[in-house]
Amino acid sequence: QLQLVESGGGLVQPGGSLRLSCVVSGFTSDYYDIAWFRQAPGKEREGVSRIRSSDGDTLYADSVKGRFTVSRDNAKNTVYLQMNSLKPEDTAVYYCAARRSSLLVSLIPVAYDYWGQGTQVTVSD
């Protein structure tokens, strides 16, 4: 079924920017929600952002609102997460995830069925 591959992580200084990519393959004619999660050492996995393929609706966690932007390129089957004004507390493994689209599902890990392997983002001097 669906496969997701993240890329774009790395080491960046505080205040810097990174753009993560999530390439999704195995789509059917169904609509999917594509989400970004992150997990820092010693912390629970948390939702970061979500975009719906059906209408492009976006959602952001309060902790990243105004700094991160999720977007999509349908021709490339790719979802992006542009991360600006990065802070040390943004350091985490970032995962993209997918599920069949729903108007009612919250941005929580158990709601998503398909996951990438993750990409490390480190914000540090």
Image: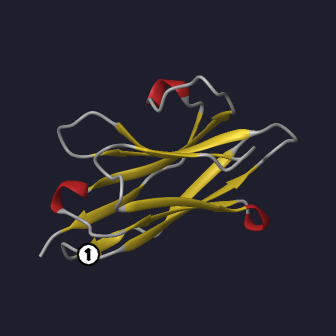
Q: Name the spot of residue 105 as percent of width and height, x first.
A: 56, 25
Identify the residue at horizontal 58%, vertical 61% (top origin).
71
Q: Secondary structure at mark 1?
A: strand
Identify the residue at horizontal 36%, vertical 52% (top origin).
65
Q: Is residue 77 left or right of residue 63?
A: right
Q: Is residue 17 left or right of residue 32?
A: left
Q: Nearer the viewer, residue 77 or 102?
A: 102
Q: Amino acid at mark 1?
A: Val
Mark 1 — residue?
A: 12
State the image quarter where residue 67 is shown.
Answer: bottom left
Q: Name the spot of residue 91 as percent of width and height, x first.
A: 24, 57
Q: Name the spot of residue 19 as percent of width and height, x first.
A: 45, 70
Q: Residue furthest right?
A: 29
Identify the residue at horizontal 67%, vertical 50% (top origin).
56
State the image quarter where residue 84 is shown.
Answer: bottom left
Q: Is residue 48 left or right of residue 77?
A: left
Above-or-below relation of 33 to 19: above
Identify the residue at horizontal 27%, vertical 73% (top origin).
11
Q: Nearer the viewer, residue 43 or 30?
A: 30
Chosen colour scheme: secondary structure
Tally the numbered discs: 1
Position of the N terminus by quadrant: top right
Position of the C terminus by quadrant: bottom left
Q: Name the spot of residue 21 as percent of width and height, x first.
A: 54, 64
Classed neighbour count for the residue bearing mark 1: other residues with Cα under 10 Å, few (<14), some (14–19), many (≥20): some
